[in-house]
Image (tube, rainbow, N blue to C red):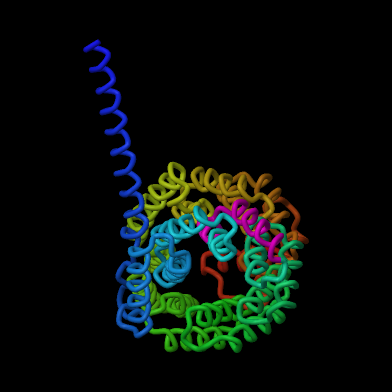
Amino acid sequence: MKRNLLSFILVVLFIGAAGFVVLQYKNKEQKKRTAVYTLLERKGTQSKTEEWKFIKSAVEKLQAAVQQNPADKKSLTALANYMIMEARASGNYSYYDAAAMEYVNDVLAADANNFEALCLKALIQLSQHHFSEGLATAESVRKNNPYSAFVYGILVDANVELGKYDSAVAAAENMMAIRPDLRSYARASYLREIHGDYPGAIEAMQAAIEAGSPGDEATESSRVQLGQLYENTGDIKNASMQYTLAANNRPGYPYPLAGLARIATANKEYDKALLFYLQADSAVSDLAFKEDIADMYRMMGQADKAKEISNKTLDEMEEKAAAAVTDESIGHYSDKEMAEAYIKNGDYDKAVAHALAEYNRRPANIDVNETLAWAYYNKGDNSKAFQYVTTALRTQSNHPRLLCRAGLIYLQQGDKTAAKKLLQAGLQNNANIFPFLKDASSKALKQLS
């Protein structure tokens, strides 16, 4: 009897202890959601703007509201929005996307069909390069909200990334019909560029800028995109003007600085270009700028310095890629970017491996096919390079980098007529493409003339 009583008491104590542990865990998880994810300090000039002061104040108030009422869906959604915006401003997508997704999941846990939370979830999935998941989420929202321009914008982006260009065009047309604004014009511009219509792309991006407010991140991002369109058509003067305007309108914004660096590179002012890239790199957490810095050292003949920076950058990219595999909620797929970096670093086996990993996720995307083709070309497997570059050309894109790469691949394949046509098209407007590729393309075209 005493033994039975003792067993009963032990069971009760165990259940109580287990309940206490579960309760503690739930409390910790709730505190984690409402306290851990906050704003990180910005770098450089961007930390001194009035915009930054306003955002910090707004986030502090929203977090206080959530501490008081963890079920405050309006405040949770607003916090997620701020985290997404700050990801764009800071370049720290890993941290802020994870933060935004935590807040979004809290809303969806209470309201699984919450429209705004589902839209934000799709946006975050696209930001993390989980394109198929983002498309599925956006499609589920569209079924119940067929007249939302915002949803169609997400559908444009998802379909473009997956290489479903006809579906992207259809979504863009719906978006434009519902709400012609900066976001719809910018997407129309990109689709026109993909299909080889540079005059139309420039016109649409100009309309996007006119629809925005000077200094806003979305407006100045569109201005940077316009600058890149001018670069691709050889209009360096207008490209430089757009980058200068964007840098003046939004002090400390790194992407126009990178644009000015490319202009300086085209003028063979490598010291000046390096300075611009260093300024951009000091402003945001974007490993692409470190690769650009390595490129400048290569151009300046400092191969060892370039290799050192590139190796360190690739190590960090590999570390983040491994984190993405073990925990998809915190990581971003970046295999395409890693493949391009490995090509520059001369490690073509790893370049092919990463390009294939990206290809397996989205085999119809023209940019992914271009990267895979270029990786195989540099590895010396031109038959496979040719296979993938034909897919990269399927939308009739006139991007000069793609045309030059394709021309070199066709030449290696023995099709001199097509190679000459592609190289001429890539070089005809003296577009601002990377000097090594331009030099190789020019030499090949001279041999064909």
Indicate the quadrant where residue 411 lies: bottom right
Task: Name the residue: 71% across, 60% down.
Answer: 143
Residue 240: x, y in percent?
51, 85
Q: Is residue 144 visible?
A: yes
Residue 66: x, y in percent?
37, 64
Q: Residue furthest front?
A: 1
Q: Nearer the viewer, residue 187 or 175?
A: 175
Q: Is residue 142 magenta?
A: yes
Is residue 73 depicted above or below 112 in this figure?
Answer: below
Indicate the quadrant where residue 225 lies: bottom right
Residue 33: x, y in percent?
37, 56
Task: Name the residue: 73% across, 54% down.
Answer: 390
252 displayed left or right of 16:
right
Is residue 62 depicted above or below 320 in this figure?
Answer: below
Q: Nearer the viewer, residue 375 or 116?
A: 116
Q: Which residues are magenta?
A: 124-145
Q: Is residue 118 magenta?
A: no
Task: Name the residue: 48% across, 55% down.
Answer: 105
Is residue 327 depicted above or below 369 in this figure?
Answer: above
Q: Quadrant of the N terminus?
A: top left
Q: Quadrant of the C terminus?
A: bottom right
Q: Is residue 278 visible?
A: no
